[in-house]
Image (spheres, coloured by chain):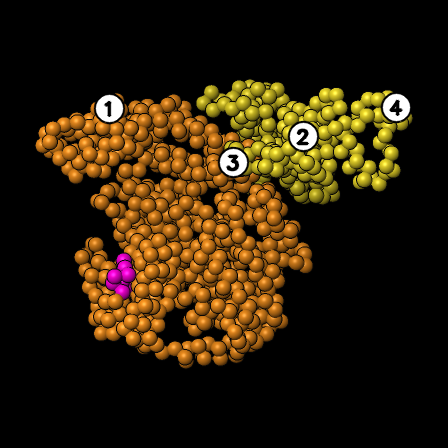
Amino acid sequence: MVRLTIDGREFEAGEGSTILEVLQDNGIEMPTLCYHEALTPQGACRLCMVEIAEGDRSRLVASCLFPVREGLVVRTNTQRVIQTRRMVIELLLARCPNVPAVREMAEKLGGQKPHPRFELSDEDCVLCGLCVRACREVVGIGAISFVNRGTVRKVSTPFDEASDVCIGCGACAYVCPTGAIELEDIGDTRRIGRWKAELKLKRCKVCSNYFAPEFQLEYIRKFAKLPEDFFEVCPTCRK
Amino acid sequence: MRAKEVKRVRSPEDLEALRDSIVSRRDPNKPCITVCSGTGCHAYGCESVTEAFIDEVKKQEIEGKVDIKTTGCHGFCERGPITVIHPEGIFYQRVTVEDVPEIISETVVNKNIIERLLYVDPNTGQKIVYERGVPFYKKQNRLIFGNNGLIDPTSIDDYVALGGYSALSKALYDMRPEGIIDVIKASGLRGRGGGGFPTGRKWESCRRADGDVRYVVCNADEGDPGAYTDRSLLEGNPHSIIEGMIIGAYAIGSNQGFVYVRDEYPLAVRNLSVALRQAEDYGLLGEDILGSGFDFQIRINRGAGAFVSGESSALMAALEGRVGEPRAKYIHTVERGLWDRPTSLNNVETWANVPLIIERGPDWYSKIGTEKSKGTKIFSLVGRINNTGLVEVPMGITLGEIVHDIGGGIPNGKKFKAVQTGGPSGGCIPESLFDTPVDFERLTEVGSMMGSGGMIVMDEDTCMVDVAKYFLGFLEEESCGKCVPCREGIRQMYHILTDITEGRGQPGDIELLEELSRVLRDASLCALGATAPNPVLTTIRYFREEYESHIKDKRCPAGVCKELIHYSIDQDRCNGCGACLKVCPQHVISGQKKEPHTLSQDECIKCGACYEACKFDAIVIE
């Protein structure tokens, strides 16, 4: 265990934990757009920046990545931190002026409108990478990844082609903070337009409802070494 | 070519015996024609010059009486192809295939100097015979670079003959790893890649870090526009880098090294590959180096052309086969680097310094330079400067000395305006700070940085807002795009700068650029984003009035920004020669022969062709 100070209060934390984990464990709210507790932190959105003291000087660090250490002094609400967060969200707002989640975050951080001198785009994705990490780290597929760099960076399937490995589980859509990934089930087909994925759905033998993509069920069945007819019946009817 | 039968060197005595046998086979008085085969000279056609020498020697039937050698870069790229005739050291420049027969018959055979091939000092008009007499070289201290002109980079024998690998022998047999680290610490060597971190301390942290496997990495992902120092070192003297890496690996306790080099440097990759194979054949690399029991391998990894991959954590990601994107370095790479193992990553030039320090000792080394910046630094001196090339200068030399004494001043009688050091994330330093010495701290104080060796000279015809926009444009494309401040911040700064240069600047733009700069510095994930504002901040700091002219008066004082200038013809100066009329692609210039011409603004595309064509300074840019 190490002891650290956050905004004048003393905390104890396990070695190896990050500042953000300590804050969340103690119910202190911290704005983030690219963090999810089940996924490796990336430090991409830079909203969770905090100021740490280092001798006579101080610097800003991403709290989702910075490991705590004995005697660490953290301040989460200095002028420098507040102004930085506001500018960062204004930059994001200029990228995604019409995304509710970004607008809400901007309002919370005091930057309701993008700066009038900024050039506006109309993107729906903030490039937080949660979908990429969920697909790779949790699902274990890696159907999508970042492509290109700089301002033209985006998330896509290899060569922007319809993915032949996406199992249609929807984990990407679930973690997306902006709702940029649309998943729809129409008749016997699941469609994730962003990845050009179309997957046939499985029909339950009992209730005749479509309940999950066949590809996903097959993936789970093999992964968990379940009997071949395991998913003939939907989870609801199995109960 | 792979040596067929090479005797492996198994001890320091073997190495000395090898050196003696190489040297004894060579006659120091035998004429030797060296042709620079660096990248600059390649562009001037040095390959055909070399071939011509080989053919001519046959034709004049003096085969065996003269050696012909292709060497690495001599640095004075402006005057290539460069040819030096040894043993006298006669320096010929701008040598063409047509000059070759005369050089052989006159200089090599009859020992006469060919005057027209000599370099003429533009300041004194004096013709200079020997390489060492050329003013470009006089104020340099070519410790790292000097051997480039003497050795064939594909010949390990050339390197050994000049004392190569004796530092390695000394390190392995006479020193303990900790002792090597102490020597490097005492020398004051700091990272030449830009950061300037003390090399000895980096090695020490790496050696002390937990773990049984350690790596050393040579960062040869030089990507700054206009910089080619690392390239020329790898191309011209690859063994000096290999030797440095082996010594470093032994000091740190590593058995595996990597060179991450740009694939855009084919000659560097080729020469380094040859050098690695030769060193292995000689038993100077691989298993049981010099019979000491120490094993070390080096692998070459070719980069795929992303500037950001020069950032250490991005480089390591790329080495691991992942996308070259930086990560936060809250846990340093000396503790958890490549594949999460302790890793010491050093720049090409840093590695090349190591054998020299081991060989000559830290006291000698630390006498060169300033209090906190020791040794020499190689710069790519480019831009609006008479003597374009690579210069190696002792730390502490002033920027003014580099530009005027080595660089030979600004061409065409133009006035100097600024020098940009440190690559795209460096800063622009004005003439008033010409007495700033080359020193890590001092360059940072004036808002720039040492960087990896770019030095771009700008004259009065340069618009500083346009310069800032250029570098931001470069960084916008080269940002990996992972974190918001860098990706979105540089984009917006570029947008504002574009507005300013196109007449859409607004009051408050300068302050907004400064605030964005602060956020980029404070909040970016890696140094690319954190240093990206430097060109903007320094140009605002030293050339604020230029920004204000663009914003308030919609005027570009340097006459560069197309949207803010127009061309006209001075009726008093124009003598109606018609040169402008002929080159104008828009046909907007009219006038009778021998009568002053006029230029119609409406269709003018401001290409500047008339300005270039006019010999009477009659075209006016306003």
Residue B430: quadrant of the picture: top left
Q: Mark 1 lies on which chain?
A: B
Q: What stretch is highlighted in magenta?
A: B91-100
Q: Which chain carries label 3?
A: A
Residue drawn at (36%, 34%), measured in percent from left and top? B466
Q: Give the alpha-carbon distance from disc 1 to disc 4, as whole Å.
A: 81 Å
Question: In the rendered image, which residue does mark 4 sit on?
Answer: A206
For the image, the number of numbered tags is 4
Question: In the rendered image, which residue does mark 2 sit on?
Answer: A197
User: Mark 1: which amino acid?
Assistant: Gln
Secondary structure at badge 3 equals: helix
Residue drawn at (11%, 28%), measured in percent from left and top? B592
User: Mark 3: which amino acid?
Assistant: Gly
Front position in the image: A204 or B410: A204
> At which x and y percent is residue B197?
51, 52
Looking at the image, is B258 positioned above or below residue A87? below
Which quadrant of the figure contains the N terminus of chain A?
top right
Queried whether the magenta region covers residue B455, the answer comes back as: no
Secondary structure at badge 1 equals: loop
Front position in the image: B466 or A90: B466
Chain painted orange? B
User: Mark 2: which amino acid?
Assistant: Ala
What colour has chain A? yellow
> At which x and y percent is residue A76?
62, 31
Q: Give the alpha-carbon distance from disc 3 to disc 2, as whole Å.
A: 26 Å
As drawn, the label of residue A150 is 3
